[in-house]
Amino acid sequence: MVRGVDCAADWSRVVKRHLFAELLEPLGVDRACKNASRLSRLPGHYRKEKGAWQRVLYLAPDGKAVAA
């Protein structure tokens, strides 16, 4: 018997709960940006349409959100 894959549950568990809640939100990442297309903007992702790797431009040294 083949077991199905529940991508929505995995997305919630791995991306929303671990990546965002535990790692990115404490650094001040916008909490509304949890969809897959926005993850392509994380550093280390190759942006095919731009022909370049996504880079970190700035990290707040104190881990708080950066005011615009």
Image: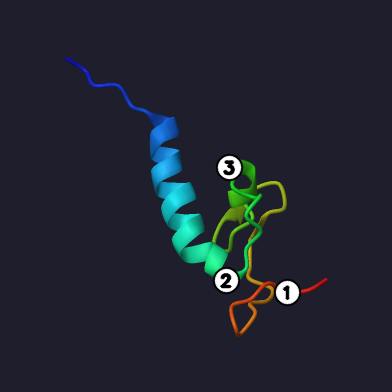
Q: What amino acid is at disc 1? A: Val
What residue sits 30% from the left and 21% below the top?
Answer: 4
Query: Residue 25 placed where, x, y %?
Result: 56, 63
Mark 2 vs mark 3, CA separation in Å: 19 Å
Q: Which residue is mark 1?
A: 66
x and y, in percent, of residue 68 in the image: 83, 71
Instruction: Please report the residue visible at 45 percent of the width from the left and 32 percent of the height from the top.
Output: 8
Give x and y (percent) for residue 26: 54, 69
Q: Position of residue 29 (x, y in %)?
A: 62, 63
Q: Residue at x 56, y 56 (%)?
A: 45
Tell me the CA gap for discs 2 and 1. 10 Å
Label 2 vs 1, first from the N-terminus: 2
Q: Nearer the viewer, residue 36 or 66?
A: 66
Q: Which residue is mark 3?
A: 36
Relative to residue 67, is residue 3 depicted above or below? Answer: above
Give left or right: position of 21 versus 33.
left
Label 3–label 1 contact, CB within 8 A:
no
Secondary structure found at label 3: helix
Q: Amino acid at mark 3?
A: Ala
Q: Give the quarter of the image for residue 35.
A: top right
Amino acid tagged 2 = Leu
Instruction: List the residue tagged with mark 2.
Output: 27
